[in-house]
Image: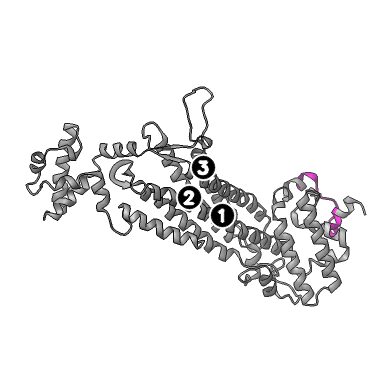
Amino acid sequence: MSSNQLDKKSQAWSALFSEPMSELVQRYTASVGFDQRLWRADIDGSLAHAEMLAAQGIIGADDHAAIQRGMAQIRAEIESGAFDWKLALEDVHLNIEARLTQLVGDAGKRLHTGRSRNDQVATDVRLWLRDEIDAIVLLLIELQRALVEVAEKNAEVILPGFTHLQVAQPVSFGHHLLAYVEMFSRDAERLADVRRRTNRLPLGSAALAGTSYPLDRERVARTLGMEGVCQNSLDAVSDRDFAIEFSAAASLAMIHVSRFSEELVLWMSQNFGFIDLADRFCTGSSIMPQKKNPDVPELARGKTGRVVGHLMGLLTLMKGQPLAYNKDNQEDKEPLFDTVDTLKDTLRIFCELVGGIVVKPEAMERAALRGYATATDLADYLVKKGLPFRDAHEAVAHAVKVAIQQGVDLAGLPLATLQTFHPAIGEDVFAVLTLRGSLNARNVLGGTAPAQVRAQVARHRARLSSGS
């Protein structure tokens, strides 16, 4: 049998048609160029399906053994790069099935009993995505560990905390980094939740209505390590909620990376000078020899838009589809694949980048002093002396105005001047007005005091050591 005859016979619909598909349509409809990455999932799903068919007496033991033998050879061919992927066979599924039939004859043709490409591809994408989610969660754990290490080393370092990008209150730099640990922890939780809904079996739903063969779908789900079966055949073959959910979770993770990236870019600029990044994560300028550009954080910021765009694309892809499967769904794979690749690559590089952050504590502290960051501490001090908070707020606003006029920090105002704003102010106020005093005063659960930062570091270490 010639290659062209084989390709034609591999098209299950070919006997109905009086002319071959045009080359233009072949190129337009083919997905084998990008869905090859599903090959492991396709083989695993097919082997589980074949094992069930044999157990149910739908195919014979000899056919089952031949399928296993043929799939083992196909696996070896793909891993070695010797497999001949053919555009005419349209996708990963038909390419593998055609090669199996070539190797083992009719047994390869019997493998498709009780299934359709509709439930087959839905199964393959779920199996593939399940494994990718596991890999991404591990990367999120690694990134959290890297941030925890830097946070612990910088628990005592004073950073100006900002609201509206204006200096607000002094915070521990370690506390600031732990905020991102919380974000990435939630990302891991979301992905674990998505995994549960992804890890359900569509196979056995066939094209849309189920099948007349006595399949044991639960057996296949157990073989593949899936948590259950999809309960409605129409929904099973057409559902892409799991891909959209994943893309939403991935978008949030990338947004967290992007927020962190924005801060790294700001902190590294000469106007802030709070940190430096290791040279291996930066580039220079082709014209300005003095430049050291934070290209990795900048590019991560840009790639976030790409991932969010894929989410919008998937939502739009699904919004107008009637039940059940439609060819539109072929367009789910490229954005999903690219989202996975982009998120994994970004997390990998940030796991390394975090360890290369060089902290500049003196610059951070100078910036905190410039912004009257202890003004709230003075207001709290007056409240503890008996003033209503709103009155204390007003008195401190006048104090800040005078400090600005004199070009000094609040702690630089003489006691006599401070007492003009309220007579309750005493010598003990200067302990309150220091950055260190402000930091240590916030010794409450979730607060920025170094003691709380160390407690949170210990909590995160225990959590991350359990792989959660």
| Colouring convention used in this rendered image of the protein | one colour
How packed mark 2 is, by other alpha carbons closer than 10 Å (few <14, some 14-19, many 20 or more), is some
* Residue in the picture at 28% in, 40% down: 368
Say which element carries label 3. Answer: helix
The boundaries of the magenta stretch are: 7-25
- The x, y position of residue 298, in whole percent, is 49, 38
- Quick check: is 390 in the magenta stretch? no
Instruction: List the residue tagged with mark 2.
Output: 146
Q: Amino acid at mark 3?
A: Ala
- Is residue 49 visible to the viewer in this orientation of the structure? yes
Left/right placement of residue 179 relative to residue 442 reads: right
State if disc 1 and disc 2 touch (CB < 8 Å): no
Q: Position of residue 366 (x, y in %)?
A: 29, 36
Q: Are marks 3 and 2 in contact (CB under 8 Å)?
A: no
Which residue is at a point 55% across and 51% down the rendered structure image? Answer: 311
Lower sequence index among marks 3 and 2? 2
Q: Is residue 97 left or right of residue 306?
A: right
Query: What residue is disc 3 on?
Result: 300
| 428 sits to left or right of 434 | left
Asked if 110 appears above or below 132 in the picture, the reply is: below
Inter-mark Cα distance, 3 to 2: 18 Å
**Badge 3: few (under 14), some or many (20 or more) residues near its Cα, within 10 Å?**
many
Disc 1 marks which residue?
A: 136
Q: Secondary structure at mark 2?
A: helix
Indicate which label's residue lies in the foreground, 1 or 3. 1
**Amino acid on which the number 2 mark rests in the picture:** Ala
| Separation (CA) of disc 2 from disc 1 | 15 Å
Disc on the earlier residue, 2 or 1: 1
Is disc 1 placed on a helix, strand or loop?
A: helix
Q: Are marks 1 and 3 in contact (CB under 8 Å)?
A: no
Q: Quadrant of the N terminus?
A: bottom right
- In the image, residue 50 lies at what x, y percent? 77, 69
